[in-house]
Amino acid sequence: MVTVLEDEAVISVIGELDFSTAPRLREQILELLNGNTTNLVIDMSRLDFVDSSGQGVLVAAMKRMRERGGYLIFGPPRRTPPRSSRSAAWTSSFWSASARLSRLHPGSDQTAAPGVGA
């Protein structure tokens, strides 16, 4: 489920973000960017696994938001990073960065993106 608050949207990713679910998340992000969304929060508190497809969607979203002059925040993170098909170093540094960023946007909604990892 996507929650839109004025120019900001919150998307929750539940379960796995992989080759089968990443395209749906990409579509949702593009739909929001084609609307009035300037800022995006991706709630990863219930994300269990992410593969390179999912990581690619997250990195591309971050770049697109930066190009638009908006922001993308990953959070609130789980206490432990999700399993990843990529190197532990990449996952650890990405997760640490998202944990720091999530402190900038406390209290984001925890709603589920339709079909993303659910």
Image (tube, rainbow, N blue to C red):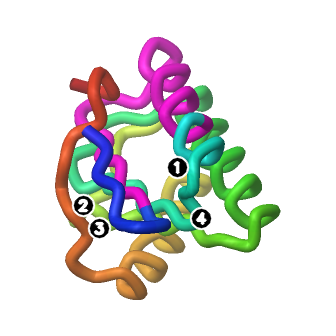
Cα distance, mark 3 to mark 1? 20 Å
Image quarter of the N terminus: top left
Q: Which residue is mark 1?
A: 88
- Name the element at disc 1: helix
- Name the element at disc 4: loop
User: What residue span does the magenta drawing correspond to?
Assistant: 9-30
Q: Is residue 56 magenta?
A: no
Closer to the N terminus: mark 3 or mark 1?
3
Tag count: 4
Q: Is residue 14 magenta?
A: yes
Q: Residue at x 34, y 65 (%)?
A: 5
Closer to the N terminus: mark 2 or mark 1?
2
Cα distance, mark 4 to mark 1? 31 Å
Q: Which residue is mark 4?
A: 38
Please state which amino acid type lies under the numbered disc 1.
Ala
Please state which amino acid type lies under the numbered disc 3.
Pro
Q: Which residue is mark 2?
A: 78
Percent across and percent down for residue 56 are 66, 37
Using the image, tell me which numbered label, if any, was put on residue 76. Answer: 3
Q: Which sits in the foreground, 81 or 10?
A: 10
Closer to the N terminus: mark 4 or mark 2?
4
